[in-house]
Structures are given as C-alpha cells and as structure tokens.
Image (cartoon, grey):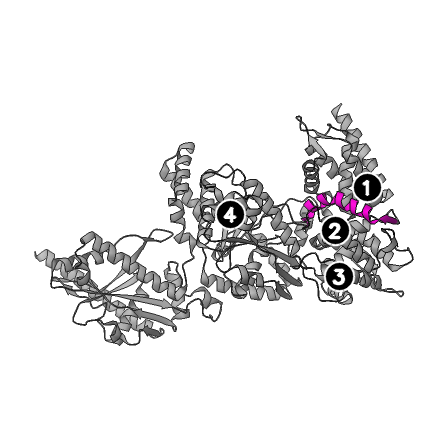
C-alpha cells in the first residue's frame, strides 16, 4: 500500500513539474503569439462552470494546447492543464486529442476511439448524478486560403489539412503567430448522451463520429475542402472491389501473400496520387509569376469565356497539345489567375524527380508509367484513381500525344487515357464530362536545342535533377510571348450519341471493356487534335519561319518579305479556318522588327535594300515554328502547287487534285473539313487567291497563275513551297512502291526505304526540315493508303496494289518540279534494285 502511494505521489509530482514547464513555455510563447478568440461572447456558448469541463483538440499539439490554455485564462474558463478530480480519480489534464496520428515515416490518422473519451463515458454511466461537458477547441495558424497571403513563406507555412511535424509547426508559429484564430464551440453534455440508453459501444461510436465531423466541418470552413488525395484517397483506392480483385489475382499469379500484394497496390497508389496543397498552389503562383516575367513578355489567354460557359456543373478534362515541359505549369497558372481551380495533371513518371517531383505533386501532378500493359494490378489502381477524380468532379489535364512534339506538328493521339476516362465516366454518367482542347503557342522554346539534337539522331536526354539545374541557365534568354488558346469543347455524351448511338442502352461492368471503346476513343483523339489545331495562335515568328523557309536560301529582300507577310495574314482573314484562330496584331514591318529583337532572324544591309534571313544554325529550329501553323496553309499551298508546272487549269481540275490528296494530308495535319466539303473549301480558296491577285480568272471556269513579271507570281511560288515537302514525301512512297512491284514489300520495309530516300533527298537539296525524313509520317501515309483501299496487305504481310495508285504519278507531273520528280524516281530505281539484290 505504501509502495502504491509512493508511485502515485511520483506520478502526481511529475504531472505538476510537466505542467509547470508548460506554463513557462506558454508565457514565452505568448510573447509572440496574438490570438483572436471566437466567439467573442464566450457566455453565448452556455458553458456551465459548475459542471466539469474537458476540452477536445482535433490532434495532439503542444502549441495548440498552450493557445487554448491562455484563451481559457483570459476568458475565465476552467484551465485544461489544471486537471479535474472525477470519481475519486484526479486527472493530470482536462484535455485530450480526438484523432491520434501513428506511423513512421508517414504519420496517418488512426480510426480509434480515444481512451480518455471511453473513461469519461464510463464515469458518467457509473454515476447517475455526474455530468461532464466536452468542449471542442480549434486552433488555426494563419489565414484561410481564400485570403491573400503576404509573401512566399507565409503561403508555404499556413495551416493545411496535412499532418504537421515539429519543424514545420515552429515555422508556422514564427510566420503566423501574430495571426492565430482560436474557436470554442458549444459543449456536448455526456449526461444527455448517456441517458439516450443506446448502450456503451453505440454511445462511444456516436460521440466519436459527431466530434470528428465537427472538427472536419470546422477545418473545411477555414481551409476549404481537403484535396490531399494521398491521404484521403490511397486507402479508399486499395479497398475498392476492382483493386481488391486485382490484389487477389496478383497474389495468385505472382505466388505471394495477399498482404504483400496489398502493400504493392498501396505503393502504386502512393506513387500515382497527387498531394494537392492550397499553400503550395499559392506559393507556386508567386514563383511562376516571377518566372514568367523573367522568361516571357507576357502570357496571352484567349477564349477563356469557354470556361465560364462549360466548367460549372461539369467534369472538365483539359487536353492540350504538348510542346514543352513548361506546359505542365502554364495551364494551371493561367487558370488560377482567372479564378478557376487548377487541374490535376497527368505527368510521366520520368518527371517524378527528387524534390521536383514532390513539388509538382503538391500542385496537382499525378504520375503514370509509360507502359501499363502487363501489370494488371497497377492498371487497376490507376484506373480507380481516374474514376475517383471523375466521380468527385475534379478537373483533370493530360496530353494525349503521349510526349512532347519535337517537330512542331501535332503527334498522332494515343487514346489510352481517353479510353480510361470514358470507361470511368460510363460507370456513372450523372455529371456531364467535357473535354476542352488547349493550344500552346510559343515564340521560342526552352528545349529548342535539345529537340534539334534528338531529331539529328542523338538519344533523348533523360530527365534528372542535375539536368534541371543546368537548364536554369537558359532562363536569362528572352522567349517572347506565349499564347494559350481554348478551343471548342467536346461534350462526351453528345460525341457518343453521334459515334455510337446505342451507348445509353448498355450496362457497363468495371471489369469488362466495351468492344466499341477503343475505336471510339481513337476517333475522339483525332477530334481533339483537330479542335486543338482549330484554336491555333499565329504569332510573328510563325509567319517569318513559314515565309523565309520557303525560299532557297532562307532569305528575302525586306520589302518582298513585308509584302508576303501581309499577303499571308490577309489570306488567313479571307479564308477563316476557325473562329478560334487568333492572328498577330502587328503589321508586317513590326513582325520583322520583332523577329530581330528575338534574335530569330537577322538583317543583312545592302545598298539596294536590306535582306532579312535566318542564320543556318537557326534554320532547322525555325521549322518547328513553321510546322505549328502549317495546317492553316495546307489547302492554299496545295492550290498554289497546282500551278508550279501548269500556267492554266480548270477550277474543276484543281478541285479534283485537292480531293485526291486531302485524305492523306488530313490525317497528317488534323484538318477539320469532312471529305465531302473539301471541294467547296478549295473553291473558296481559289476565290480568295483571285481577290489577292495570286491567280487570275481566264473565264470558262479556268484560272491561271500571274505573269512572271508581276510580284504576285513570286508570292504564288512561295505559297506553293510551303506544302511541297508533304507532297514530295507522298510521291516518294508511291514511287518506291511502284518500282518494287506489287506484293514485294512489307509495310516496315516500305517505311525504311522511304525514310532512307527522304534522308538522301534532304542531303541533295539541302532541306532544313528535320522532320522531312520522319518515319512516323511515312507510316501514317501508308496506313491511310490501306484505309482508303488503294493498297492491301496480303497473308504474307506484303503490300499489294492495282492501277489505282497510278493516278498519283499523273498528278505528280502537275504539283512537283521535273528536277525533284526525276531525283525521286532515280532513287526509287536504285532502292528497288538494291532490295531485289538482297532478296536474291
């Protein structure tokens, strides 16, 4: 007995010493901290000072406890550190945390009823005369996220939903101690709860649930909703039926325990999920504002009224073109500046670099591996994550090209993410889903030199933290303006009504992929790429590159260049490609001056008139900016090309040529017109060129090129050169196929031979176009030939054809010069002879 009393005295003495230490710490803390206590009228809470009071904190925190202690002293309320004597048992403190955090290195909330809560409920149940008041007390350091913060550090260390470590809490106190909110709430009387007589277990569960919901609502009111998906979603992902089934299958297939398979699935979810942070969003906004001001002359946003119309009430998926790593941050930045919620952005796992990957994750990046096939467990977890985002109405952003374009053209879409999004939405179609195409228009690229190296055959540079630091040196350069254009939205339900009208009649099982999904997703991908091109922003660098690269030496007299730039701009105005296209406000002379300032063109002075040109090292880089807008001049260039070898043609003949070639350039450049309308577009183009004096009307339905003595004749020739390389590639394919013979070449062999021929032609004719020999372009053309039925693939995977391809040779005489046509034919003969020798 004496020994028991001794230990009791030791425990009591230790509690007094600990509380005395906390009292000293409180006085020291209050020298800095200034707290606003809510409500201002404490009496309105109805706390009965004759009834024992226990305070409840959301989580364990000494600093929060000391703030509550000081607030109680100031308000004349019972102190939490004073303790109470209940049922002959003295408590060291009259306060306890509701949520306990456990785990290392990542601390997670534990769904467990606090032991102190159990003890207090048991005491009230035991003594019918006893009542205890539980008073929730919330402490918030700093302002809520909808208010403006002062400085980067304040934004970074303001209160959030995330668990707070000791170092971060110290920084939070230092930065926000003068702006602290402390709120008491109305007490919960345990006597009333116990008297409901619902049993001990149900009483505890009800009390715990009520208190947790209260704290969550209180925090939501101050900080906004919890979007920290790593903490709130990872566990729910692993518990879903689909992932649980995948875990079971993985355990059997890999011969591992389900516990280990669950850990693997949880690891996948943690690797994938974003860790959205309001303070980080605010911090990033300030950093990016400084970065954009250093990099660019401005960020121009166009057609943002589209967002005002479609964003409310819909699940939004932004689908931009992919030009640069800057894309990941640029769209989120402009959306935040316009008052919209930044989206969750799908990023390649290669960007999950040390430090950088974590920061990107905090502003909404979620990561995916390049290849999902073969790992069904990973696919199940990722699919469930996408479904969760759609279900919650969280805006998403991803790049359906699969990677950054190195040539400036849009890449063929990879429909994997689209199919996954469609499949997730089909499970619950209550909230409409809309895709918003986004066009990024740059005047200079941070990665420009790296792209040139890769197109020249150098291996792709792997993203590393060191590489990122080295790239920071380029931030001293001037990169002009960047344009962000929103295109025409695509509502998924409307799209499906047109492409697969019976989709509403089916029930969709998460485990089964609809048979029509892949083909429809492919069509959707093409539609999105077309809408992106329809939202193109034409800038001065685009037009300078388009014009100067069409000349033999990438140079023109200044006055000739001014006239050509003016003609191109007027042509875009007379033949409106789309209502979403934006044109430069500058005049031709201003464009040249701007190009000089950007160091993209150079001026060579001469007594007969200055010459404007592109230096040889920059000529290849300028092809990128030409290719950005090549699609806008595709039809005008084809029309002009009809008059390279013919002085006069019937309008019907021009129309026939355009209709023949159009399916192939449509698939390459994602042109918007249906095939049955392209003839009308060709007629409109001829009319516009007649107005601009690029063609002249001969009567009887015929048009002719101008006399060689007039300026417009040279402009027509330059316009024809814009799309000439596209026609040359197509003629190469037909020539190689024709010389080899029907049933002689596989598709792969034909691609290789065409690529080698293109490389040879580029060397002979000094083409400054790295993409001229791009094998993917030839692959696309061959697939179009197969799709159009002009060639077929036999059982031996060899390409067969009939006389229908001969029509291309006929039109080649019209649109290609004799020199180029003969060079292609000679190389085709040489290649076919070499192939025959190898086969022999």
Nearer-N-terminus badge (3/2): 3
Q: Pointer 1: residues within 10 angstroms few (<14), some, or many (20+)?
A: some
Instruction: Tell whether position 27 is magenta.
Output: no
Residue for point 53% across, 54% down: 434
Which of the image's four quarters has the C terminus? top right
Q: Nearer the viewer, mark 2 or mark 1?
A: 2
Nearer-N-terminus badge (1/3): 3
Q: Magenta region, mostly helix, strand or loop?
A: helix
Nearer-N-terminus badge (1/4): 4
Tag 1 residue: 811
Q: Secondary structure at mark 1?
A: helix
Mark 1 and mark 3: Cα distance apart in space: 29 Å
Tag 3 residue: 569
Which of the image's four quarters has the N terminus? bottom left
Nearer-N-terminus badge (2/1): 2
Q: Nearer the viewer, mark 3 or mark 2?
A: 2
**Residue 441, percent across and down?**
65, 58
Mark 3 and mark 4: Cα distance apart in space: 39 Å
Q: Secondary structure at mark 4?
A: helix
Nearer-N-terminus badge (3/4): 4
Tag 4 residue: 421
Name the foreground residue: 625 vs 672: 672
Side of 224 relative to 816 (left or right): left
To which quarter of the image does residue 727 belong? top right
Name the foreground residue: 425 vs 474: 425
Q: Which region of the structure is painted magenta?
A: 648-676
């Amino acid at each position: 007995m004496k020994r028991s009393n001794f230990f009791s005295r030791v425990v009591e003495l230790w509690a007094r010493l600990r509380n005395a230490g906390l009292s000293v710490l409180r006085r020291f803390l209050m020298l800095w901290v200034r707290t606003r206590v809510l409500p201002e009228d404490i009496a309105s809470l109805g706390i009965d000072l004759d009834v024992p009071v226990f305070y409840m904190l959301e989580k364990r925190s000494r600093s929060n406890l000391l703030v509550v202690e000081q607030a109680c002293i100031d308000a004349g309320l019972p102190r939490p550190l004073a303790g109470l004597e209940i049922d002959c048992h003295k408590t060291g403190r009259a306060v306890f945390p509701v949520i306990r955090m456990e785990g290392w290195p990542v601390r997670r909330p534990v769904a467990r009823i606090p032991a102190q809560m159990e003890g207090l409920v048991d005491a009230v149940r035991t003594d019918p005369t006893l009542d205890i008041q539980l008073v929730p007390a919330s402490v918030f350091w700093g302002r809520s996220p909808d208010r403006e913060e002062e400085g980067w550090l304040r934004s970074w260390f303001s209160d959030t939903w995330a668990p707070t470590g000791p170092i971060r809490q110290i920084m939070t106190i230092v930065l926000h101690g003068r702006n602290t909110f402390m709120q008491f709430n109305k007490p919960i009387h345990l006597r009333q709860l116990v008297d409901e007589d619902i049993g001990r277990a149900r009483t505890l569960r009800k009390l715990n649930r009520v208190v947790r919901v209260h704290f969550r609502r209180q925090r939501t009111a101050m900080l906004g909703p919890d979007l920290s998906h790593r903490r709130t979603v990872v566990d729910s992902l692993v518990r879903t039926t689909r992932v649980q089934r995948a875990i079971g299958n993985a355990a059997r297939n890999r011969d591992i325990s389900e516990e280990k398979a669950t850990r693997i699935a949880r690891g996948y979810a943690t690797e994938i999920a974003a860790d959205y942070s309001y303070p980080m969003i605010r911090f990033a906004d300030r950093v990016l504002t400084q970065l954009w001001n250093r990099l660019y002359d401005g960020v121009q946003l166009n057609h943002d009224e589209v967002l005002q119309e479609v964003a409310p009430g819909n699940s939004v998926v932004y689908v931009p073109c992919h030009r640069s790593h800057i894309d990941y941050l640029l769209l989120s930045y402009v959306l935040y500046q316009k008052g919209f919620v930044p989206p969750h952005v799908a990023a390649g796992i290669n960007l999950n670099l040390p430090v950088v990957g974590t920061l990107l994750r905090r502003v909404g990046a979620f990561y995916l591996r390049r290849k999902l096939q073969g790992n069904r467990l990973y696919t199940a977890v990722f699919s469930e994550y996408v479904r969760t985002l759609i279900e919650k109405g969280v805006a998403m952003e991803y790049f359906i090209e699969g990677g950054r374009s190195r040539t400036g053209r849009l890449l063929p879409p990879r429909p994997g993410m689209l199919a996954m999004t469609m499949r997730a939405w089909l499970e619950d179609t209550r909230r409409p889903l809309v895709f918003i195409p986004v066009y990024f228009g740059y005047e200079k690229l941070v990665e420009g030199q790296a792209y040139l190296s890769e197109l020249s055959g150098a291996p792709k540079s792997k993203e590393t933290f060191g590489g990122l630091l080295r790239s920071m040196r380029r931030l001293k350069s001037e990169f002009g303006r960047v344009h962000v254009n929103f295109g025409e939205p695509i509502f998924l339900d409307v799209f499906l009504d047109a492409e697969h009208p019976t989709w509403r009649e089916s029930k969709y099982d998460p485990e089964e992929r609809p048979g029509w999904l892949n083909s429809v997703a492919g069509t959707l991908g093409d539609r999105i790429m077309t809408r992106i091109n329809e939202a193109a922003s034409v800038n001065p660098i685009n037009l300078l590159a388009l014009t100067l690269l069409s000349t033999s030496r990438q140079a023109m007299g200044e006055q000739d260049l001014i006239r050509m730039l003016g003609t191109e701009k007027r042509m875009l105005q007379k033949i409106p490609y789309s209502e979403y296209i934006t044109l430069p406000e500058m005049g031709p002379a201003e464009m040249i001056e701007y190009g000089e300032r950007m160091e993209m063109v150079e001026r060579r002075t001469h007594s007969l008139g200055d010459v404007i040109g592109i230096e040889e090292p920059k000529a290849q880089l300028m092809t990128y900016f030409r290719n950005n807008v090549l699609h806008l001049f595709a039809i005008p260039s084809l029309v002009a090309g009809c008059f390279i070898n013919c002085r006069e043609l019937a309008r019907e003949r021009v129309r026939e040529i355009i209709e023949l070639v159009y399916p192939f350039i449509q698939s390459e450049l994602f042109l918007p017109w249906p095939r049955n309308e392209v003839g009308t577009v060709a007629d409109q183009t001829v009319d516009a060129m007649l107005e601009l004096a690029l063609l002249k009307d001969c009567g009887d339905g015929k048009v002719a090129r101008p006399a060689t003595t007039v300026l417009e004749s040279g402009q027509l020739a330059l316009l024809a050169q814009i799309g000439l390389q596209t026609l040359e590639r197509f003629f190469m394919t037909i020539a190689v196929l024709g010389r080899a013979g029907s049933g002689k070449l596989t598709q792969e062999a034909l691609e290789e031979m065409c690529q080698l021929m293109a490389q040879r032609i580029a060397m002979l004719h000094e083409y400054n176009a790295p993409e001229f020999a791009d094998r993917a372009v030839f692959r696309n053309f061959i697939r179009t030939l197969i799709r159009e039925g002009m060639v077929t693939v036999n059982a031996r995977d060899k390409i067969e054809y009939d006389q229908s391809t001969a029509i291309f040779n006929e039109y080649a005489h019209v649109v290609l010069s004799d020199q180029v046509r003969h060079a292609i034919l000679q190389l085709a003969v040489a290649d076919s002879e070499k192939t025959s020798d190898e086969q022999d």
